[in-house]
Image (cartoon, rainbow, N blue to C red):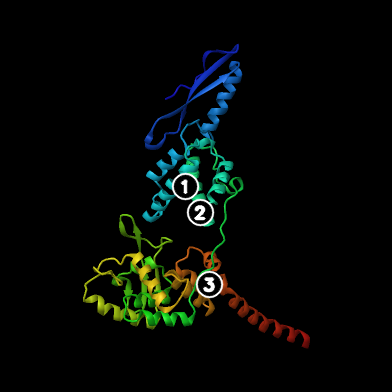
């Protein structure tokens, strides 16, 4: 236990110098930490200052001086990150840190990193990368500094919005396929292994990784349902299984055409003996980037410009909203964590909902006005 008693250690410019050792909360791994308190002046003032400092420590408001740089702390954070990140996400963090964050901010002491430093970095990055990329940089910095504040290694999170003038990126409008494009795409995919995958994507709005992670145990043909319990993630170490993006499984009722497509797919896969509904050439997982490559080739063949495999998800969502499926149902079907995400992404489909709402309101209001005029 550190000795918090004041001790006189000499004089400075004719004034007494007082010191004490203040015990601090344990560091990572149970490491013992303490801070040397120093005060120049009379003993009474030194005692009052020591009491104030001890109060800060007790309340968790004291941050001991530390020379650790932002780059050093960032490396430590990446070495032991929170467990709720997928391997692919961590690889992206490591790349951002290596290419941009450490060269621009790594040498600045963690406790001296300011919002001005961040604004300067954002301005330099705007010359090299997109606004959306800078938003991703900002979010990583915010998370890292937030943990540093929780660990009492930094006094404030310099990436807080009002201090750092958080960068913003305009959201690109979702690319969805027209009915004519869907027909041309399905015609181009006829006889290929991509066709049943495309059919299920249009029927469910599921993500590429979720579709590729499907196994036959996820299908209930009697009830006509499909359970999305996992997704495939392509990382540097290979293709891995993970939980769906929002961390929750979901069960989707399927249209008859999708069930029929799955039955035909099952007949093909039973001969191969694979657990995956959409297996790769070797019967194992179908590598996600190869699906995207194959889809781009189909789009070229069908003369469809500007579309990616993810456009099938946008197409399914847009069709559901245009068919006046309740937005809450669309959210649950897509696996979005909140309905706000759904409505923000597919705002282009909401005018039809607004028009239908206007017609229904008019029907009620006209009737009420008519009844009121008769009275």
Alpha carbons under labels 2 and 1: distance apart: 10 Å
Name the residue at 46% across, 43% down: 102
Which residue is under mark 3? 327
Marks 2 and 3: in contact by CB < 8 Å? no
Q: Is residue 126 left or right of residue 151?
A: right
Q: Where, quadrant-wise, is the C terminus in this rendering?
A: bottom right
Near mark 2 (Cα within 10 A), the count class, few <14, some 14-19 or many ≥20, is few
Residue 7 location (% of width, % of height): 51, 16
Contact, mark 1 vs mark 3 (Cβ under 8 Å)? no
- Between disc 1 and disc 3, the foreground one is 1
* Relative to 14, 109 lies left or right: left
Horizontal arrangement in the rendering, residue 57 relative to residue 292 (left or right): right
Task: Work out whether residue 322 or residue 18 is closer to the camera in this orientation and state it.
Answer: 322
Q: How far apart are the two marked residues, 1 and 3, measured between alpha carbons?
A: 39 Å
Question: Dot 3 lies on which element?
Answer: helix
Asked whether the residues under the numbered discs 2 and 1 touch, taking CB atoms below 8 Å apart as contact, a structural biologist would say yes
Dot 1 or dot 3, earlier in sequence: 1
Q: Which mark is residue 129?
A: 2
Residue 320: where, in percent of width, then height?
A: 50, 77
What residue does disc 1 label? 100
Instruction: Decide which of 149, 205 is in the foreground and name it.
Output: 205
């Amino acid at each position: 236990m550190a000795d918090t008693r004041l001790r006189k250690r000499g004089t400075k410019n004719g004034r007494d110098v007082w010191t004490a050792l203040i015990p601090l909360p344990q560091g990572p791994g149970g490491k013992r930490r303490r801070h040397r308190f120093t005060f120049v002046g009379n003993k009474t003032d030194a005692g009052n200052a020591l009491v104030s400092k001890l109060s800060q420590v007790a309340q968790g408001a004291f941050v001991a001086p530390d020379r650790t740089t932002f780059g050093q702390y960032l490396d430590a954070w990446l070495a032991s990150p929170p467990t709720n990140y997928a391997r692919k996400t961590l690889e992206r963090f490591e790349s951002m840190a290596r290419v941009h964050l450490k060269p621009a901010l790594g040498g600045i002491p963690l406790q001296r990193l300011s919002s001005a430093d961040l604004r300067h970095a954002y301005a330099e990055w705007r010359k090299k990368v997109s606004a959306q990329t800078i938003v991703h940089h900002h979010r990583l910095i915010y998370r890292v500094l937030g943990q540093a504040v929780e660990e009492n290694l930094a006094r404030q999170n310099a990436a807080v919005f009002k201090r750092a003038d958080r960068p913003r990126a305009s959201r690109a409008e979702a690319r969805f396929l027209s009915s004519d494009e869907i027909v041309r795409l399905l015609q181009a995919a006829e006889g290929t292994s991509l066709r049943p995958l495309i059919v299920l994507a249009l029927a469910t709005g599921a993500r590429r990784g979720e579709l590729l992670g499907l196994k036959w145990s996820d299908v209930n043909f009697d009830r006509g349902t499909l359970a999305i319990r996992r997704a495939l993630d392509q990382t540097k170490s290979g293709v891995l299984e993970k939980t769906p993006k929002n961390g929750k499984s979901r069960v989707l009722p399927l249209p008859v055409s999708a069930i029929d497509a799955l039955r035909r797919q099952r007949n093909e896969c039973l001969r191969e003996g694979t657990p995956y509904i959409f297996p790769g050439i070797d019967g194992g997982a179908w590598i996600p980037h190869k699906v995207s490559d194959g889809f781009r080739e189909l789009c070229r063949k069908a003369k469809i410009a500007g579309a990616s495999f993810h456009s099938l998800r946008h197409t399914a969502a847009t069709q559901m909203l245009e068919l006046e499926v309740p937005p809450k149902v669309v959210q649950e079907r897509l696996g979005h964590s909140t309905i706000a995400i759904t409505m923000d992404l597919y705002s282009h489909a909401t005018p039809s909902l607004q028009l239908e709402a206007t017609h229904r309101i008019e029907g009620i209001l006209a009737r009420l006005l008519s009844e009121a005029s008769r009275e």
